[in-house]
Image (cartoon, rainbow, N blue to C red):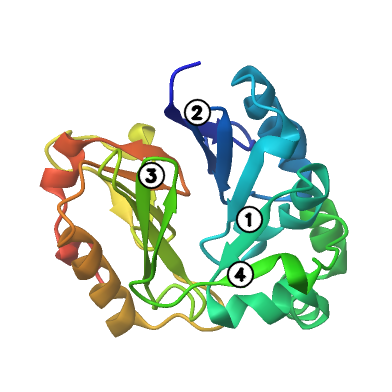
Amino acid sequence: MTDSIVTIDCHYGGPGYASAYLIAENGRAAFVDTNTAHALPYLLGALDDAGIARDAVDYIIVTHIHLDHAGGAAPLMKACPNATLICHPRAARHLANPRRLVAAVKQVYGSEVFERLYGTIEPIDETRIRSVADEETMTFGTRTWRFIHTLGHASHHICIHDSASNGVFTGDSFGLFYDWMTIDPAKPFIMCLSTPTEFDAPEARKAVERLLALNAGSAYIGHFGELHPDTLRLMDVGYMNI
């Protein structure tokens, strides 16, 4: 398989609603976001399709700890024994000890819905977790990743610029984009994603401005898939009517 970025449909809420990503290079791999534990077969299936062994996964990056992005981190880490988990400094302690995170989510959704959507959230060995600073860089094969702290949607959110693709993995900072919700292609329907507990509108605007300033060729978003250059050129920070 040639080196590539693969969009993984995690089937959260049905097909086409939530995505994770596999970055493959020279027989090694990294994931960006994991969705929930229920997405594990899709994540590992993408790895198998790429012909990459599970012990060749070097990194699992979570853009933030909301469970539709990080709920599958523990089982994926278990399946990929050599992987290091990359996250925001504020996220690290919750991934190592998810008790407070689980309690907060259950308070919002209730135990019954929580169990159906997310199942059991297990802790991750803190020795396998690495937090990254704002503007920190690291290499993966021939590419350089630049990590950007993007607050607003969550106080523990990061985005990742990938030098090889000139793409940016935006998590939920760009909001939600589904082709089928766009009526006029000249005005793509991109909706801000707020959260029940800690949404910060001014910081969310700053995050979008900062990401647009990267002049990336593509945006790999959490809901759903890759935004191509034509769509990016139509984006306006004003789309977030907040």
Quick check: marks 1 and 2 in contact, CB under 8 Å? no
State whether residue 50 is above or below residue 185.
above
Alpha-carbon span between mark 2 and mark 3: 21 Å
- Numbered badge on residue 220: 3
Nearer the observer: mark 2 or 3; the answer is 2
Quarter of the image with the C terminus in it: bottom left
Quick check: marks 4 and 3 in contact, CB under 8 Å? no
Q: Is mark 4 on a helix, strand or loop?
A: strand
Q: Mark 2 points at which residue?
A: 26
Tell me the kind of residue under disc 1: Asp
Alpha-carbon span between mark 1 and mark 2: 29 Å
Q: Crowding near pointer 4: few (<14 within 10 Å), some, many (20+)? A: some
State whether residue 156 is above or below residue 174.
below
Alpha-carbon span between mark 4 and mark 1: 20 Å
Instruction: Please name the residue shown 38% across and 71% down the image.
Output: 136
Tell me the kind of residue under disc 3: Tyr
- Which tag, 4 or 2, sits closer to the chain's start? 2
